[in-house]
Amino acid sequence: GGIITQTPKFLIGQEGQKLTLKCQQNFNHDTMYWYRQDSGKGLRLIYYSITENDLQKGDLSEGYDASREKKSSFSLTVTSAQKNEMAVFLCASSIAGSSYEQYFGPGTRLTVL
Amino acid sequence: GDSVTQMQGQVTLSEDDFLFINCTYSTTWYPTLFWYVQYPGEGPQLLLKVTTANNKGISRGFEATYDKRTTSFHLQKASVQESDSAVYYCVLGDTNAYKVIFGKGTHLHVLP
């Protein structure tokens, strides 16, 4: 088996601040994802990366940047935190072309003061 | 575009009750439908998959089928336990093989 690690578990920032969330996986999966989870809204895709050095925008990419530094890691940056950014950010990975079976990390909970 | 609608935001049951959660979907392609479950403090995990209409997906006591005529997709369990308390998401495979579409989730609360 494998595991997805997200750091930090809790992130508190100030409005307007640039904040970075990190994700590591040891499944050796090619594809990685970042989702935002808001209460009552399900999961919305922010960015995904099909393979190392690839980046694809999801439905909610505005206000975010992403970086796939190597196959095992995928970072997400909130470029300017806003008060309505309070949410849980979930990282996932899958075998390339098997997006239906995604393995998720436990999430990073973001609070903006 | 493709979409999935999950109307039940919250369901409260007692142990041994029957569970039924329904979703509807819209797609121009052959649908592949999934259910994910998210337990408190964890990320979502795949519960089961259904790729053919009227065929059941079965896992951990849960069953799912979809009806192509009504474009509906449901999850059921004959007898829920307190440990089934979680959020259940219906998910539609996108025509983009690298993406899926999540419903808004149904929060199941099972009373002891």
Image (cartoon, coloured by chain):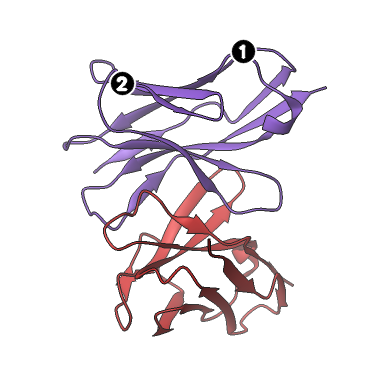
Tell whether B12 sits left or right of B73.
right
Q: Residue at x 34, y 54 (%)?
A: A99
Q: Residue at x 50, y 72 (%)?
A: A26
Q: Are marks 1 and 2 in contact (CB under 8 Å)?
A: no
Q: Residue at x 42, y 59 (%)?
A: A45
Q: Quadrant of the C terminus of chain B?
A: top right
Q: Is residue B53 above or below residue B40?
A: above
Labels 1, 2: front one = 2
Q: Chain B hue?
A: purple
Crowding at dot 1, Cα within 10 Å, few <14 / some 14-19 / many 20+, comes out as few
Provide residue A37's location: percent of width, then percent of height.
56, 54
Tell whether A82 sits left or right of A62.
right
**Chain letter tied to red:** A
Among numbered discs 1 and 2, the one appearing first in the sequence: 1
Q: Is residue B107 above or below residue A112?
A: above
Which residue position is annotated with label 2?
B55
Q: Quadrant of the N terminus of chain B?
A: top left
Q: State which chain disc 1 sits on.
A: B
Q: CA distance from mark 1 to mark 2?
A: 20 Å
